[in-house]
């Protein structure tokens, strides 16, 4: 009986360890500044690392998040990232940041998902309608109107959005639990993939006429490319 209990405990511990390691791994060193030079670098967590003795304060610094993003585009929003691509010192640290600007009267950060991160959003200016949808089969919508100082959480992998319902520009900052959270914008991925998904597939999935699907594909493929 003790042997069975030990085996069950071991299996549960193994499963728990697997779940815990589903996000960015914890670093085993103080920092690992990312570099593109492979000659003197050590490959860790997706990036080569600079010799710690050669690291400087600039490796952990990024200016400019006070500058509004250009929202003159089809969706009326702009995401300015601060992840490992912009701050090499974030490598292995499992965190990143974005600034999001929204145009008045309908600026939209369209439905998307981060495959590797939970997001926590803080509204600085404006009024945003935000929400996320849970996985199948519930597909439950959690939505809220946010004002300056309000915070909302989007769980990892959930499709979510932000929509400016105000008459002024809106600004939000979001922290994400990965150095490189990734982003999949649903409409762009489905209708703008390269090569294109068979229109028969999308027509049946979305219950649309195939001509409408082709129109959407031509529009999003052009936007993506």
Image (spheres, rainbow, N blue to C red):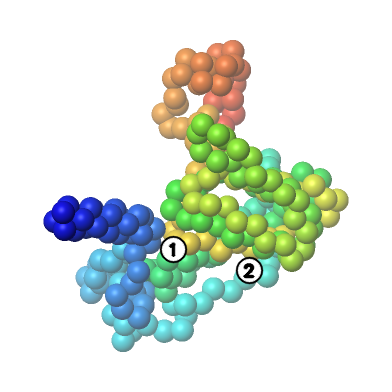
Task: Find residue 93 and report its horizontal and vertical position in percent.
Answer: 41, 70
Badge 1 density bin: few <14, some 14–19, many ≥20, Cα 10 Å: many
Left or right, 219 with respect to 34, comes to right
Residue 121, quarter of the rendered image:
bottom right
Q: Secondary structure at mark 2?
A: loop
Foreground of the two, 168 or 41? 168
Placement of 64 over or under 56, stated as above or below: above
Left or right, 100 with respect to 10, comes to right
Which residue appears at 85% of the width and 51% of the height? 167
The circle on residue 65 is: 2
Q: Secondary structure at mark 1?
A: loop
Which residue appears at 24% of the width and 70% of the height? 42
The reply to whether residue 149 is visible in this rendering is yes
Foreground of the two, 76 or 95? 95
Task: Find residue 107 and report its horizontal and vertical position in percent.
Answer: 73, 47
The circle on residue 179 is: 1
Task: Find residue 133 and report its horizontal and vertical position in percent.
Answer: 59, 41
Which residue appears at 59% of the width and 13% of the height? 209
Residue 153, quarter of the rendered image:
bottom right
Residue 47, quarter of the rendered image:
bottom left
Instruction: Point out the image quarter for the N terminus.
Output: bottom left
Which residue appears at 56% of the width and 21% of the height? 206
């Amino acid at each position: 009986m003790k042997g069975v209990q030990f085996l069950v405990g071991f299996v549960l511990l193994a499963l728990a360890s697997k779940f815990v390691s589903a996000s960015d791994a914890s670093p085993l060193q103080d920092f690992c500044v990312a570099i593109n030079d492979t000659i003197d670098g050590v490959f860790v967590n997706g990036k080569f690392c600079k010799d710690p003795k050669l690291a400087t304060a600039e490796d952990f610094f990024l200016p400019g998040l006070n500058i509004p993003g250009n929202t003159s585009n089809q969706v009326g929003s702009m995401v300015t990232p601060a992840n490992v691509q912009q701050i090499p010192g974030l490598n292995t640290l499992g965190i990143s940041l974005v600034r999001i600007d929204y145009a008045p009267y309908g600026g939209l950060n369209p439905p998307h998902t981060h495959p590797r991160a939970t997001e926590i959003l803080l509204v600085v200016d404006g009024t945003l309608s935000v929400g996320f949808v849970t996985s199948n089969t519930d597909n439950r919508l959690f939505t809220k109107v946010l004002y300056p100082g309000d915070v909302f959480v989007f769980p990892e992998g959930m499709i979510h959005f932000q929509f400016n319902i105000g008459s002024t520009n809106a600004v939000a900052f979001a922290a994400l639990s990965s150095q490189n959270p990734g982003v999949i914008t649903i409409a762009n991925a489905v209708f703008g993939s390269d090569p294109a998904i068979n229109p028969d597939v999308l027509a049946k999935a979305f219950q649309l006429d195939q001509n409408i699907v082709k129109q959407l594909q031509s529009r999003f493929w052009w936007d993506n490319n």
